[in-house]
Structures are given as structure tokens and as C-alpha cells.
Amino acid sequence: MLLVTGAESFLADRAVRSAIAAVSKDAPGVEATDVDAATLDIGVFAELTGPSLFASERVLVMRSLENLPSEMVPHLLEYAGSPSDDVLAVLVHSGGQKGKGVLDKLRKASVNEVVATAPKAWELPQFVAGEIRLHGGTVDEGAASALVDAVGHDLRALAGACSQLVSDSGGQAVTAELIGQYFGGRAEVTSFAVADAAIAGRIEPALEQLRWALDCGVAPVLVTSAMAGGLRGLAKYSSAPSGMREADLAREIGVPPWKLKQLKQQSRGWTPGGLATAIKAVAQADADVKGASGDAGYALERMVLTITRAHGRR
């Protein structure tokens, strides 16, 4: 029995596919059944976990475990204590508190678990590097970061981009130049480009990037999120003790080591007072784009103006 928990659907789906592939490797023609836990009753469960007339091995994928009817819980736990050798049950829980009691009992039964948790923003370049290695390619940290900036934080989109780049690289390393050829147009309108320009105090490029991003369909909340992340990292960098080793400083701030050079450059011209003003502006804009204001574009422009003017303020 395998338990897959977490809100990141791409990683959860990958864990399910891997489990089915592992069974299929040793038993070609494996019978796989995908059901919603909410629809199960005792009879259906017994049928799906019993021997099959058509295949020697079976995989039962039970989605949305948190919605399992309460009367089914004892039967599932009983099965977890003595699962069939011919049936692999894959239980998928989408995260959250609902159904946590069932999860705790399954864990006590020593059920194998895969956690499908989305990587933090600063871990995404590592995810990209891992995906590219998975497909037999190579990439350095700078290029991996460039792909994140170009494609965004959606893991499915990143994984697809990695597969495409390795396939088309002809066995060569995936470089920032190659990424620019494929995704340069998207990179120019990402929320991170808006944040970088604003934090650098470059008012006209920041506004231009913002308008372009909104015209291309970038969600306003992604702009405030990128801005908040950039300013938080900058604030942590500015307040970190001096003399720390690079690796320790990166862990303290919560960024990959290559990001420190950018933070060092960005920190020039920022004062504690200016950072405080900028962070307050982002908080206000975030509330505005989530419903406090009827004009998200105006709220974001006001945020960008406030941040760029706060740069260098004493």
C-alpha cells in the first residue's frame, strides 16, 4: 500500500504513475483502476481489492482520500493491516486537515508514504536541475534560474520545458541562451522582471514591464508575490550578521547561493526606512488586488511608484 499526501498535484500524479509503472514492469498488462474515495462502499472496495479474473496484478488508485465515507474507514484500516499481495492500493490525499485522523492511523500501520509538497520558490532552480538530469541533460544554476524566471512556478510547465530543452539541445548543456531562444518572450513579462526593476529603483522600466505583464495576462497577485519575495530576501540580507560564510548566509536568508550576488547589488541604495516603506506598499497592494480595490492595475502601479521612490530614501 502506498500513501501519497500533499497539495502539489503534479508531484502526486507523478508518484501515482511511478507506482503503476513499477508494478507494470514486473507484471505486463497490470489492471489499474482509478476511483474517487467519496464513491466507495464496502462492496465496491471488496471487489477492487480482491483477485481479478483478467490480470495477475492490480493497482487501485483511490483519489481524494479526505472524502472517504466514515463507514469505510475501519475497512480501509483493516485492509492496510493485511493488504493483498496481488493488489497495490495507492491512496491519494490532497493535503489539509480533513481526513487527518485516517492519515495518522495509516502511518501507524507503517504504510509507505510519498509527500507531494511544492518546493519553495528558492528551491525551484534545484527542481529544474533535477528534471533536466532526469532526462539526461545538464544545466548550471544560472540557467536553471533563468528557466524559472521565464516559465514561472508551475511545476508541470517547468517539467515540460525541461523535457523540451533536453530533447532539442542535441546532447549539449542547457544554457541561458537556449532558454532565451525558447522562452525569452515570456521571460520579459514575468512578475520577477517587474520586481527586479522596481527594487533597483528603475521607475520607467518597472512601469513598462508591469503594463506589459498585465497586457499579457500575468495575474496581479503574482506581481505582488514576486515583489514581496524580493523585498523579504533583501531585508534578510541587509540585516544578516556580517562575516557569515556564503553557504550559511544563503541558508539564513532562504535563497540559493547564486542569489547572494544579486542581493548584494540590490542592497545598494536601500535603507531600513526605505525597505519598511516598500514592504508596506506591497502589503497594501496585495490586499487591493485580492478585493480591497476595484482597480488592480492602479494598485500595482501605485505600489511600483512607491517602491522605486523608496529606493535610496534616507
Image: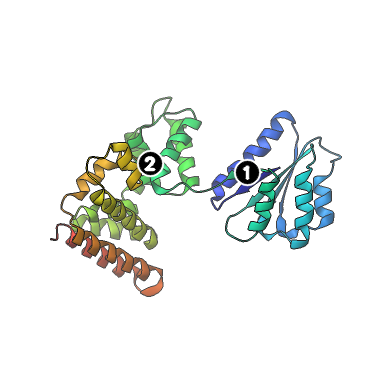
Which comes before the other along the chain, label 2 or label 1? 1
Residue 202 in which image quadrant = bottom left
Q: Position of residue 11 (x, y in %)?
A: 55, 45
The residue carrying pointer 2 sits among few (fewer than 14), some (14 to 19) or many (20 or more) residues within 10 Å by Cα, namely many
The circle on residue 147 is 2
- Tag 1, which secondary structure? strand
User: In front here: 188 or 24?
Assistant: 24
With 12 as the anchor, is 31 left or right in this view? right
- Which quadrant of the rendered structure holds the C terminus? bottom left
Residue 222 in which image quadrant = bottom left
Residue found at the far top of this picture: 171
Q: Which residue is mark 1?
A: 113
Task: Please give the name of the residue rendered at 14% of the width and 57% of the height, measured from the top-left corner.
Answer: 312
Task: Please give the name of the residue rendered at 24% of the width and 62% of the height, measured from the top-left corner.
Answer: 276
Estimate the spatial distance between the alpha carbons at disc 2 and disc 1, rounded to whole Å. 30 Å
Q: Position of residue 156 (x, y in %)?
A: 50, 46
